[in-house]
Image (cartoon, grey):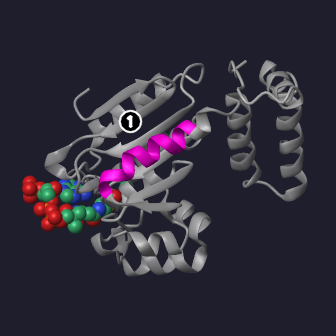
Amino acid sequence: MEFVKYEVDGNIAMMTIDRPKALNALNKQVLTEINEVLDQVDPNTVRCMIVTGAGEKSFVAGADIGEMSVLDREGGVAWGKYGNDIFRKLETLPVPTIAAINGFALGGGCEIAMSCDIRICSDNAVFGQPEVGLGITPGFGGTQRLARIVGMGRAKEIIYTASNIKADEAYRIGLVNAVYPQAELLDAAKKLAGKIARNAPIAVRLSKKAINDGLQVDMDQAIVIEENAFGDCFATEDQKEGMSAFLEKRKEKNFQNK
Ligand code: CAA
């Protein structure tokens, strides 16, 4: 792959978007390669995936404006669907994901970060949805996910004004969970991934699915989603291991992902 790197270290995977000449902007090839990486992520071995951008300046500076500039209506719908299908695949990936945002996260960059489960960023990170300044709406989920994460009022202000926000403001409004000095960001992401990976992977996966699916339906249906996820855990070996370890006062747990 030319623009997207995929590495697995133990049970932690890392996807790095690496297109330095365009600040890691998402052209069609980058999106296609992201899609190929997502198809490779194996929940039998990977317990958490970190998504980041190469270099120290940019996470992802958006969808590729040059490529989009020539689209007509039909092309716009198709391009939106192309990105949305891939970001939805990322959002529903059966492993937890952490966006380690190392710089500009604009337009499609903010949108791919919002498709991850958890966002942390470096102190030089900049977030925004500049689309209306380009004469378009956000197209890879921004009109939907930003409001769900930071609330409708803030999302509308960010999108309507097309103004960027810095890391401290992103933290204040809950767009990111934590801010680190740039040099410490990846270690912090790996530490967080390691903390997740130590827990029972099936229980983590089912928690992700229950949270995601439950937010789409009313509370009566949502609670049934939880009951089923909870019940499914009792059919796993890892539930036996987790509870035996507690009852035997054993600190070390040997979760097998089974
Ligand atoms: N698409 C294509 N190329 C891009 C790009 C993008 N989104 N962002 C940056 N680049 C390119 C620049 O054209 C430039 O290329 P050249 O050297 O060949 O001219 C190179 O990356 C470096 O960028 P700058 O010289 O502009 O760097 P800077 O430090 O002066 O500014 C920046 C950095 C503020 C991020 C600026 O590049 C910028 O505003 N980029 C566009 C951000 C944007 O509007 N993103 C949203 C796109 S729309 C979208 O994403 C739609 C959607 O929802 C799907």
Residue holding disc 1: 15
Q: Which residues are magenta?
A: 182-194
Q: Residue drawn at (38%, 69%), measured in percent from left and top?
A: 128
Q: Which of the pair 177/147 is nearer the observer?
A: 177
Q: Where in the figure is residue 97, as x and y percent of width and height?
A: 53, 42
Q: Quadrant of the N terminus?
A: top left
Residue under the image location 52 percent in, 75 percent down: 172
Dot 1 surroundings within 10 Å: few (below 14), some, or many (20 or more)? many
Ligand 1: give its quadrant: bottom left
Residue 68: quadrant of the picture:
bottom left
| Between 244 and 34, the one nearer to me in the picture | 244
Q: Is 240 left, or right, of 149 in this rendering? A: right
Q: Is residue 257 left or right of residue 162?
A: right
Residue 60, x across and y down, in percent:
31, 53
The residue at the far left in this view is: 21
Label 1 element class: strand
Asked whether residue 190 is drawn in magenta, I would say yes
Residue closer to the observer: 143 or 172? 172
Q: Left of 135 or right of it: where is 11?
A: right
- Quadrant of the image occupied by residue 43: top right
Tell whether position 102 is magenta: no
Q: Between residues 131 and 243, which one lies in front from this camera angle?
A: 243
Amino acid type at circle 1 is: Met
